[in-house]
Image (cartoon, rainbow, N blue to C red):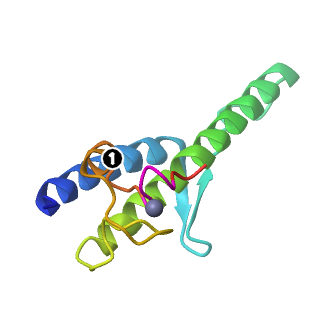
Amino acid sequence: MLDKTKIKDKLEKERDILLEELRDMGKLNPETNEWEATPEAQDFPETDQNDMADRFEDFEAKSSMIKTLSPRLNNILRALKGLNKETFGKCDVCKKDIEVGRLDANPAARTCKKHLEG
Ligand SMILES: [Zn+2]
């Protein structure tokens, strides 16, 4: 039997961590519902080329982190939403129960070990 309270707790904690990390690097665009990196505030208008390059690199790094983190967040939000549905804990492919150990390690898992995504 799945301990949904435990799973919910775990998902919410993970969600909060991810949200915190994402807020450090960007903001959620309410129109597209996608996270976007925020450029570093420009303190000095007369910045030289090196500063510009640094800033660009920083922005790129943030963007790529956001690209990694936001699908994870969406996956967790989806799992939280579906937690009380009958389909929760069932493999997307074969519709059988996902192994408890797998759900324990990754509560947002959508497939059983056999149909592991990727
Ligand atoms: Zn399966």
Q: Which residue is mark 1?
A: 102
* Residue ID at (44%, 55%): 73
Q: Tag 1: Cα neighbours inside 10 Å, few (<14), some, or many (≥20)?
A: some
- Residue in front for this viewpoint, 113 or 89: 113
* Residue ID at (68%, 31%): 58
Q: Is mark 1 within 8 Å of ligand 1?
A: no
Query: Could you say where residue 52 lies in the image, as x and y percent from the top left?
Result: 80, 29
* Residue ID at (13%, 58%): 3
- Asked if the stretch drawn in magenta spans residue 13, the answer is no
- Asked if the stretch drawn in magenta spans residue 112, the answer is yes
* Residue ID at (33%, 76%): 87
Q: Quick check: can you spot residue 41? A: no
Count of number-bearing discs = 1
- Outermost residue, right side: 49
- Residue in front for this viewpoint, 77 or 60: 77
Image height check: is 88 above or below 105?
A: below
The answer to whether 77 appears left or right of 31 in the picture is left
The answer to whether 27 appears left or right of 62 in the picture is left
The answer to whether 72 appears left or right of 64 in the picture is left
Query: Could you say where residue 84 lies in the image, as x and y percent from the top left?
Result: 22, 76
Q: Where on the image, by quarter, is ligand 1? A: bottom left
In the image, the segment drawn in magenta is 110-115
Helix, strand or loop for the magenta stretch, by majority: loop
- Outermost residue, top side: 50
Image height check: is 109 above or below 94?
A: above
Query: Could you say where residue 48 lies in the image, as x and y percent from the top left?
Result: 84, 23
Secondary structure at numbered mark 1 = helix
Q: Amino acid at mark 1?
A: Arg
Q: Quick check: can you spot residue 24? A: yes
Query: Could you say where residue 97 lies in the image, as x and y percent from the top left?
Result: 31, 64
